[in-house]
Image (tube, rainbow, N blue to C red):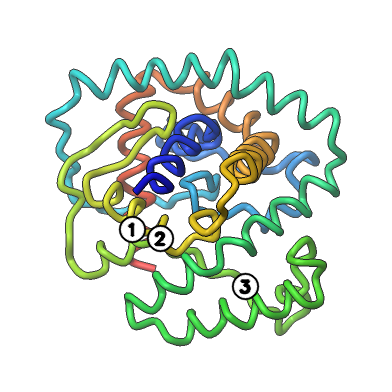
Amino acid sequence: MKKLLFIFILYFMTNPAIMADEAKLTSNPVSISNDDYDDLDFLDDDDGDELSEVTTIKAPALRDPLKFINKPIFKLNLLFYKYLGKPLAQGWQIVVPKSARTGLNNAFRNLGYPLRASACVLQWRWHDAGSETIRFVANTSGGLLGFRDIAAKGSNGIQPVFEDFGQAMGSWGLGHGFYIVLPLLGPSSLRDGIGWYGGTFVHPYFFVDDWLVTLALGGTDKLNKLSFQYKDIDIALEGSLDPYAAAKDFYNQSRQKEIEE
């Protein structure tokens, strides 16, 4: 229990990339097109930080009985992003070459294999679980511990599967319950919060005894991802009339899309 508490604190303190979920704040998602965003195939949705386009779909209404609490927390999250998350990400982008940041994203995604594979198994998606296993073995052994995504190369490359326990629960027919905005962690729901907690049991961070190592790994992962994402976040924030409502809608639609896929 002590380690689980620390893992929560870790994500609470080092997860500015969750602002990616709050970034798609317009009805027309911002697409990545400039040179700074080349080869972003490594960006995944393990911590809710993927900036992929979300096609408008019909998602069940997401109840928000805690809006009187959620909205102030949302505003605090934006302040955290503006005055701490973004400046740190900009500095990281300047200091660390793009090739190194790309490799780090690949490596951290590779590290999340147990979570994704377990979520596939919980949905009886044996083919996807097998694909993730092949990717993990190939990238760990031949891709410098995952820094190079060799499994995805070529016409017959194996693309990553993005699954988590919240999606697994959704595939069983469990609804969100109600909307939650977590301090610094951002948009979530009762179902996805429970799924996130369950997922900590199978993530490699759970088995690291040294809390400083865990802190360093988690912080580097989140900061590195944000260094690729903050420009899209800014564009989305500037184009939204109601950031809170748009973030909630984007979160609901994106999670529904992920479950249906």
> Tag 3's secondary structure?
loop
Q: Nearer the viewer, residue 4 or 175?
A: 4
Q: Residues within 10 Å of mark 3 (few under 14, many from 20)?
A: some
Kind of residue indicated by mark 2: Phe
Q: Position of residue 91 (x, y in %)?
A: 77, 24
The correct choice, above or below, for 143 with respect to 124 in the image is above
Q: Position of residue 43 (x, y in %)?
A: 62, 52
**Residue shown at the point (35%, 62%) measured from the top left:** 165
**Residue annotated with mark 1:** 198
> Tag 1's secondary structure?
helix
Q: Tags 1 and 2 in contact by the CB under 8 Å rule?
A: yes
- Judge left or right: residue 180 versus residue 258: left
Residue at the limit of the structure toward the left, as seen here? 65
Kind of residue indicated by mark 1: Gly
- Return the mark for residue 201: 2
**Residue annotated with mark 3:** 159
Q: CA distance from mark 1 to mark 2?
A: 6 Å
- Return the mark for residue 119: none
- Judge left or right: residue 133 versus residue 59: right
